[in-house]
Amino acid sequence: MAGFRFVLLGGLVVVCVACIGFIYLSNNNLKRADEVTEMVKDSHKVQHAMETVLKSTFELEAANRGYIITRDKDVNASYDVAKQTLLKSLERCRDYVSKKPEQLSRMDQLDSLIINRMLLLDSVNQLLDQEGRDSTINMLLIQGDDVMDDMRLLVNTMKSYEKKELERREALIDSNTEKSRKVTVLFGILTIFIALLGYFLIEKERVTTRRFQEERELAFEQLESSELRYKNLIDSAEDTICVTDNSGNVLLWSEAGESMFGHGETFLLNKKLQDFVYPLRDDSTTEITSAKSDDALFKEMSKEKWVGQKKNGQKFRVEISRSSWKENEEVFFAFNIRDISIRVKNDEKLQELLKDVSRSNEDLEQFAYVASHDLQEPLRKIRAFGDRLQQVCEEDLSDRGKEYLSRMQDGAARMQKLIQDLLSFSRVSRNAGEREQVDLNKVLTTVLSDFSMRIEETQATFDTQDLPVLKKANSTQMHQLFQNMVSNALKFRKAETSPQIRIKYEIRRGNALDPDIHGLDPESTYHYITVSDNGIGFDQKYIDKIFTIFQRLHGRNAYEGTGIGLAVCRKICENHGGFLHAIGKPGEGSTFIIVLPSNL
């Protein structure tokens, strides 16, 4: 409907504009035709005036010739009349050409010639009364003939100019007439087109209106069906769904709310929602307390915790989500109210369990630290007395006794190494240590210097890139991290193969990191450092085992160590808000990925 009205209004505007344009063009053409007609009349007047001037000049000449022949005073009087007539004709002709610069210039020349001619004729008339002046009179007459020829030529020029102007103006009249005819035809065609378009649009609107009425009737039926389904959907929801106006007056209440709050729908209608739901003001005690607020429900929902009150006065925790819309400048709100009493209790239990687990972990770390620290003293005594027994009583021992003593010393040494590694892991787990600016390039240089002899023995090569400078890191732990990385690369090499170790660095966003690296912010940036080697590698299915404390993929006789180094490395990365990951393939080497926050 609105589209039709818009098109119809547009058509009327076009018709009005076309009519105004036609009237303007017609009026313009009429004005120009009137102007051209006046100009044609002026041209005719100028030509007639030129004829009159020429005729008056001839009459003046004739009167002068008659007076020369007859010497009659009456003839001379006709000369004076012809002279006055000529002067009046000249004045009229000048008025006609006053707006024509070219003709006006010629008119000035004609005036000059006529005045000159009249002066010559006057001189002739004066000399006729004197004897012996015939030669002078003849000379004046000859000069007068020359002036007369010039006058005739100038008059013909002016008449020729007016004739051309007349032809041009008549052509202009024809052109304006043709344009008017074309405009009239065009306006007629446009009027017919608009009339046909209007008829088409009216017919289309009639069909559209009939279809709209049919669709509206169908829409009403669908709306009734939809409202029924909507009500059934609301009533079937487990959460309470409530619709209020801007003041909180309840307009709609689902069946779930009746069982949740203990009030029937008829009781709740036109009551305020604020009478049944309050913001939680203090949940520090087991007793739920609340305070009513007329506007809290219409503020920022996420900033409040909520309490519902049943018909019997019992209070329970609820979760509320809200949406709003506007109809006829009036605002309405839809609230979804969910009973979260059980979830709150479960969360409280979970928090208690987490506190218990945290306390248990602290106790275990404390136990590991104390145990590893206190076990070193008796272990040192075992090794010291073993060494003394080997030095003092070795000759008195049998071969079997010597073997037992050797095994005892080896076991004590391994146990001391395990205790030292356990103590190291415990220290890393207990705290991150002091933080300071750490240049990882200097750390790597120090580590490679420490391993210089081992690197020379294995003929290892290193390909390294510039590493970042960390603003807040523990220098000792960073040194321990890279020491373990380089040690593993040198230790787990293939036989008869020189280690080739590559250390690369780049900045990456969290969403561009490996999918196996968890717990990182996808929108933050991280230091991404990889340590790759061409060693024996490992099967990727053992990825979790290699980072578990005291777990080994190889026997003690094959490779030295206690299996705690990578666990310590991962713990160091976690202490700094990062992560340690590894990718390996048997026989093709491994790559360890160190991820640290870029703001570290």
Image (spheres, helix red, strand yellow):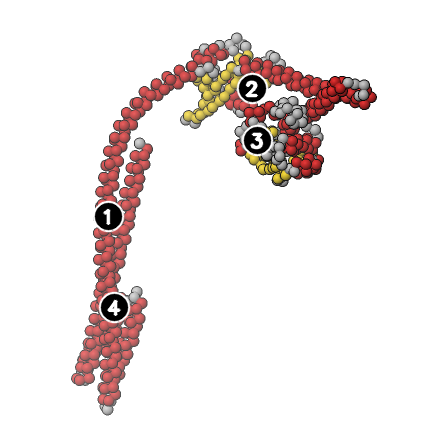
Q: Residue furthest left?
A: 70
Q: What distance separates the C-alpha of mark 2 from that of mark 3?
A: 58 Å
Q: Earlier in the sequence, mark 4 or mark 1?
A: 4
Compare residues 166 and 318 and report the one nearer the observer.
Answer: 318
Q: What distance separates the C-alpha of mark 4 from that of mark 1?
A: 37 Å
Which quarter of the picture shows residue 214?
A: top left
- Characterize the local packing of mark 4: few (<14), some (14-19) or many (20 or more) Cα atoms within 10 angstroms: some
In the image, is 223 to the left or to the right of 246? left
Image spot of residue 140 (x, y percent): 25, 84
Q: Nearer the viewer's eye, disc 4 or disc 2?
A: 2
Q: Earlier in the sequence, mark 1 or mark 3?
A: 1
The structure residue drawn at horizontal position 24% and vertical position 33%, both measured from the top left corner, is 203
SS type, badge 2: loop
Q: Amino acid at mark 3?
A: Gly
Using the image, tell me which numbered label, if any, was put on residue 161.
4
The structure residue drawn at horizontal position 69% and vertical position 37%, both measured from the top left corner, is 452
Q: Which residue is mark 2?
A: 305
Q: Earlier in the sequence, mark 4 or mark 2?
A: 4
- Characterize the local packing of mark 3: few (<14), some (14-19) or many (20 or more) Cα atoms within 10 angstroms: some
SS type, badge 1: helix
Q: Which residue is mark 1?
A: 186
Using the image, tell me which numbered label, if any, was put on residue 106.
none
Image spot of residue 377 (x, y percent): 77, 20
Q: Amino acid at mark 2?
A: Lys
Q: What distance separates the C-alpha of mark 2 from that of mark 1?
A: 76 Å
Compare residues 461 and 251 and report the one nearer the observer.
Answer: 461
Q: Earlier in the sequence, mark 3 or mark 4?
A: 4
Asked if the residue under mark 4 is in contact with the one under mark 3, i.e. CB atoms within 8 Å, the reply is no
